[in-house]
Image (cartoon, rainbow, N blue to C red):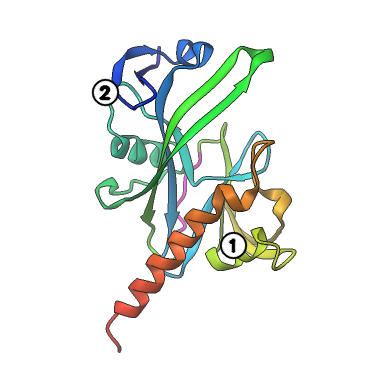
Amino acid sequence: MEYLDIYDEYMNKIGQEPRDTVHQNGLWHKTVHCWMYDDDANVYFQERSDSSKLYTTASGHVLAGETVRDAFRREIMEEIGVDTDASTATPLQIVFWRQDKDAKNWHDRAFAHVYMNRLPTGFMDFHFQSTEVAAVVRMRAKDCADLLMGKISETTATRITQNGANSVTINVADFLVAPDETAIIKYGYILQSIMQVTAKQSKNSPCP
């Protein structure tokens, strides 16, 4: 049985409960949203197996007794098969997330810790948790931001599966969002963060 640490609304730890109990009772807990990028300012989305929509590179619950960085490394390994050094991951924000599905008696109260980390440019050795992830989609962070802001109607990306890679066309409807969200609000901050950090790295790189 999977246990989660639970918290009050001020993020003070108050105990542990089984995962099902946490969601049945709407108890505050921690999750991690993992994002990977490369030095070419590409962002990596996972394509969800259940919806074919684009979401975080990986994400999930922070288990009882686990640190957020531990969870970052574990989720990246479990979902896309990459053993990343979580000590180099950059914390970006903590989102206070609330969602209720009353018909299913499911209530989410999560402190979503958003982290990003660098993936080597040209990396292709992904291994997917097939029940959750169908592919990884790589696209330019700027192109993605322009798309979500409505500056362009579509963009091209590289869809990577266990059988190889091919070019695909992406539009706003391809992104996973909740009914009360927009894609630019959900993903805009991470895209901006990737563009900023890769621009700074490029500026600081020694000239050949």
Whether residue 137 appears in magenta in the rendering, the answer is no
Q: Is residue 139 left or right of residue 125?
A: right
Q: Secondary structure beneath disc 2?
A: loop
Q: Main secondary structure of the magenta part?
A: loop
Q: Residue at x 45, y 15 (%)?
A: 22
- Total numbered badges shown on the rendered structure: 2
Tell me the quarter of the image containing the N terminus: top left
Name the spot of residue 123 as percent of width and height, x first: 43, 60
Q: What amino acid is found at the position of numbered circle 2 in the picture?
A: Gly
Q: Residue at x 61, y 53 (%)?
A: 184
Name the spot of residue 14 as percent of width and height, x first: 30, 15
Q: Which mark is residue 145?
A: 1
Q: What amino acid is found at the position of numbered circle 1 in the picture?
A: Ala
Q: Residue at x 40, y 46 (%)?
A: 93
Q: Is residue 162 visible?
A: no
Q: Is residue 116 left or right of residue 104?
A: left
Of the image marks 2 and 1, the number of the one nearer the N terminus: 2
Name the spot of residue 176 as percent of width and height, x first: 64, 42
- Mark 2 and mark 1: span between their CA atoms? 36 Å
Between 128 and 93, the one lying in front of the other is 93
Q: Is residue 56 left or right of residue 69?
A: right
Q: Is residue 111 visible?
A: yes
Please, which residue is most extreme toward the front here? 10
Q: Is residue 30 left or right of residue 43?
A: left
The residue pinned by badge 2 equals 65
Residue 90, compared with residue 13, is above or below; it is below
Q: Secondary structure beneath disc 1?
A: helix
Q: Which residues are magenta?
A: 124-128
